[in-house]
Image: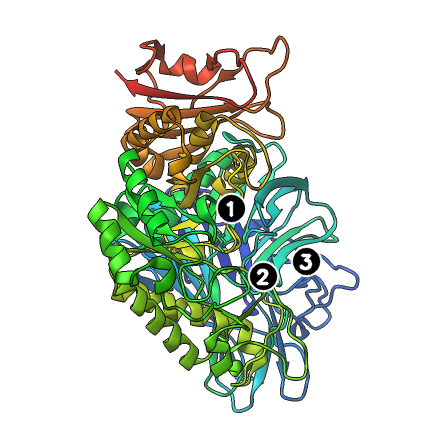
Amino acid sequence: MAITFDEGRRIFTLTTRNTTYQMMADSFGYLLHLYYGAKTAGFTDWGLTFADRGFSGSPYELGRDRTYSLDALPQEFPVQGTGDYRSPMLIVRDSEDTYGADLRYSGHEITEGKYSLPGLPAVYANPGEEAQTLTVTLSNNRLGLSVKLLYGVIPGKDIITRSVIVRNNGSKPFTAEKLYSSCLDFTHGDFDLITFHGRHTLERQYQRQRLNHGSYSVGSRRGMSSHQYSPFVILADHDATETHGRCWGMNFVYSGGFCAEAELDQYGQTRVIMGLSREKFSYGLEPGEEIAGPEVIMTFSSEGLGKLTHSFHACIRENICRGKFRDSPRPVVLNTWEALYFNFDGRKILDAAESAKALGVDMLVLDDGWFTNRNNDAQALGDWSADEGKLGCTLGELVSRVKAIGLDFGIWVEPEMISEDSRLYREHRDWAMIIPGEKPVLGRNQLVLDLSRMDVREYIIQSMRGILNEGVTYLKWDYNRSIAELYSHSGSNGKLAYKYILGLYEILERITSEYPGVLIEGCAGGGGRFDAGMLYYTPQIWCSDNTDALDRLTIHYGTSFGFPMSAVAAHVSTCPNHQTGRITPLKARYTVSMTGAFGYELDPLKLTDDERREISGQIRQYKLDREIITEGLYYRLSNPESDNYCAWEYVSHDGSKALISVVIPQNHGNMPVIYITPRGLTHGAFYRDIESGKIYPADALMDSGFPVDMPKSDYESFTFRLERM
Ligand code: GLA
């Protein structure tokens, strides 16, 4: 049993292959967190301490006993107003504007299978995969407030998920002013916090810092998970490395605003909590109404960050991603954006398709600029009908012609947006989120549609049907601005940030179930919505609008901690690079891009013969390596903070093959030799480098590494393929 309950001690134990999680409903009915760490037998309630703490109050029923305070005890669901002055997960305001609610344990249920959430993406269990759910109910009688804490356990993957459903069972309305989904309280604190920050064209940069007294938070107020901070954090021992040490991760399955807070309190205790952004969130609950807090996926590793990464990769790839393309090979694409931008016609597209076909590309993706009046980024979003003048034919005819060349056809859309200069805006001004009487904030000249409205959602679905019914088998689903205003003509604006995302999920759910053969690539100006929520609908995401090989190294490095490489879309583009002006060799661009879902984003007609030969070879090779890249175990073999090279490795699940990539960004005089130390090989076995024929004993290789040739110039890159003998 993955979940057990000890009646006498009222202790819940959640067990996975390598971890144990424990909590206790104590004699007062408070749900105290006991332990999350390496797998253990027995009970861990001996870790709780009770002392008279000044200025830390006690529950009333303790009378003169001042040794029990929620301000000092580790909790599962800290709530404002209970004498715990650390940051809470729930803040409730009642109809008289009074804050606070004392929540006590009122029951629980252990069920087979993994829970799902209404309207929200969540981890699912595969057929035959062991999974259990624990639901603990906490109640407050004054308000009629019921909180269901949901814990999902996937033992085989070392995954525990958390979510929460807040419900009004009372007779008067109240409002949730803050709602977080997960909390990890530690009775001690001497940790590093790892977060991933960035900006447009430089997402998910790794940052590691000591967690000091005070509260440190990352989040997004943008209505999207954002380029600026990833909804994914890690707490780690100071000495935790890729291969050893303890670390805990939280990965939010949500695509809207979020917040993660890490706090080292007055007693040196640590709290990490994660949930919905509080920005413009004020969720009124009428009697009978409820709200589900999105899921947080948690894992613990006592074997360093590498193992933590493997658990997240396996869970997101196999228990979040869905549909045909979860498992089947992703097409190698030619995307027209950096090749042609808005400057194309039907002939140019067909010429590009023919040229790409000869290179071995599988799919042409027609990016922005294909619909009526869309010759720059100031117009036409919302009017999803093909510009037949520009294309020289209907969309259906263009698709057929590209298919006749032998390529599948994909297309760019940005369905959540509306241009002021569009037919849709002229007809439905109230569909845009604009505050009446205020001038709207423009982002890339566009406004955001109100996805909380059913008529808007229906319009979007109908528009996408119009495109997909023409034979399009791939959508690049873009989203190119942050939300600034939340205003719906249908009211309830404190709920709108959340309802927007639920609206988005409903649209994606309906499209993916109506068109199961269609691959959707998520995108938000590159990786502005790179999160586990989107990956439930779109198994790959355009990782960044930055295609520069050097910058992509750190973007991929950061992204890899929490997200599987099969989700990372990366393309070889032209040089000088359009974002950085940098010139890098075609080989280095390939080495960096063949990291996940692969393609090209350049004009194939402008390639030299030598480049064409090289690219044909790259595509052939990628297709041979595609399986290990998208399904293998991924290892980071370098640390960009300290190493003068970047190296990473994929190992097949049976350990029989390894693919190792190395990029040396800068050459220097008389460079020290770089040794690459692979991991994950079979102990005692020998491996052959299939290009050089060299034979290596696995254990020595994993101990001391192998030398890489001295670079002769900047951006030299190498790929090694090892096979077990
Ligand atoms: C966004 C995307 C790009 C491209 C453009 C088109 O910026 O991230 O890849 O599709 O939009 O306008």
Q: How far apart are marks 1 and 2 (CA)?
A: 17 Å
- In this orientation, does residue 283 appear? no
The x and y percentages for residue 302 are 49, 37
The amino acid on which the numbered mark 2 sits, given as a three-letter code, is Arg
Q: In this view, does 92 lie above or below 248?
A: below
Residue at the spot x=31%, y=29% of the render? 616
- Indicate left or right for 211 with 367 as reference: right
Q: Residue 544 carries which label?
A: 1
Of the residues under marks 1 and 2, which one precedes in the sequence?
2
Of the residues under marks 1 and 3, which one precedes in the sequence?
3
Q: Residue 444 carries which label?
A: 2
The x and y percentages for residue 446 are 56, 67
Residue at the spot x=46%, y=58% of the render? 478
Residue at the spot x=64%, y=74% of the render? 440
Local SS, label 1: loop
Q: Is ligand 1 within 8 Å of the beta carbon of the residue shown at mark 3?
A: no
Q: Is residue 512 above or below residue 188?
A: below
Q: Which of marks 1 and 3 is in front?
A: 1
- The residue nearer to you, when weighing 266 against 316, is 316
Please rate how many residues cluster around mark 3, counting C-alpha atoms within 10 Å: few if below 14, some from 14 to 19, many from 20: many
The amino acid on which the numbered mark 1 sits, given as a three-letter code, is Ser
- Indicate left or right for 90 with 463 as reference: right
- Read off the residue under disc 3: 72
Looking at this view, name the residue that lies furthest to the bottom: 171
Circles 3 and 2, Cβ within 8 Å, touching? The answer is no
The amino acid on which the numbered mark 3 sits, given as a three-letter code, is Ala
Residue at the spot x=47%, y=64% of the render? 294
- In this orientation, does residue 634 appear? yes
